[in-house]
Structure formats: structure tokens, C-alpha cells
Image (cartoon, helix red, strand yellow):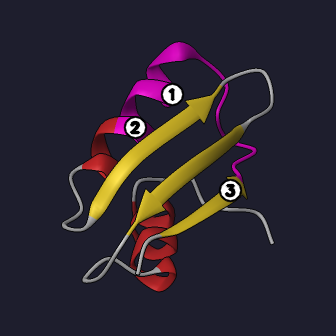
Amino acid sequence: MTTTVTYSIPNISCNHCVHTVTMEVGDLEGVQSVVADLESKKATITFQPPASEEAIKGLLAEINYPAAE
């Protein structure tokens, strides 16, 4: 089952941040697409198992771009 989620990521402040979030999350097994946006400070991620929301949020926190609740 494919899932799409959008997270607010307040730490996105430049194009390097966008690139980092896109590449790091995109490397998770099961992640199909990552669209990070500098202007809105959001990332939309489409994934299927074995990726999970918990794994994605954990990785974002690990790379210092935690998803806002």
C-alpha cells in the first residue's frame, strides 16, 4: 500500500537543506519520491513498506530536520 504524507520541517532554510532532505529520505528503502520545498518549509513523501512514518520521522530527526508536530 502506497502512502503519501506531508511534513512541516521548520529547519529547511536553504537549497542545501532541500537537497539534504530529498537525498537522505529518498535513500530509505520503500521511499518512492520526496519533494521538499524551501518556501513552504514542507516535504511531501510517497512511500510503501518497508518504509514507515516512524522511520521517516526518525531519520529526519537524526539529520537535524525534525518534522514539526
Crowd around label 2: few <14 · some 14–19 · many ≥20 (10 Å): some
What residue sits right under mark 2 in the picture?
22
Question: Would you name the residue on which mark 1 appears?
Answer: 18
> Mark 1 is on which residue type?
Val
| Distance between mark 1 and mark 2 Cα atoms | 6 Å
Q: Do the residues labelled 1 and 2 touch (CB within 8 Å)?
A: yes
Q: Position of residue 35 (x, y in %)?
A: 52, 36
Looking at this view, name the residue that lies furthest to the front: 1
In the structure shown, which secondary structural element does the residue marked by tag 1 occupy?
helix
Disc 1 crowd, CA 10 A, few/some/many (<14, 14-19, 20+): many
Q: Residue 6 carries which label?
A: 3
Magenta-colored span: 8-22
Left or right: 68 as drawn, with respect to 18: right
Cβ–Cβ below 8 Å for labels 2 and 3?
no
The mark total stands at 3
Q: What residue type is labelled 2?
A: Thr
Q: Which of marks 2 and 3 is nearer the N terminus?
A: 3
Closer to the chain start, of discs 1 and 3, is: 3
Q: Determine whether the residue tagged by mark 2 lies in a helix, strand or loop.
A: helix
Position of 11 with respect to 16 (left or right) is right
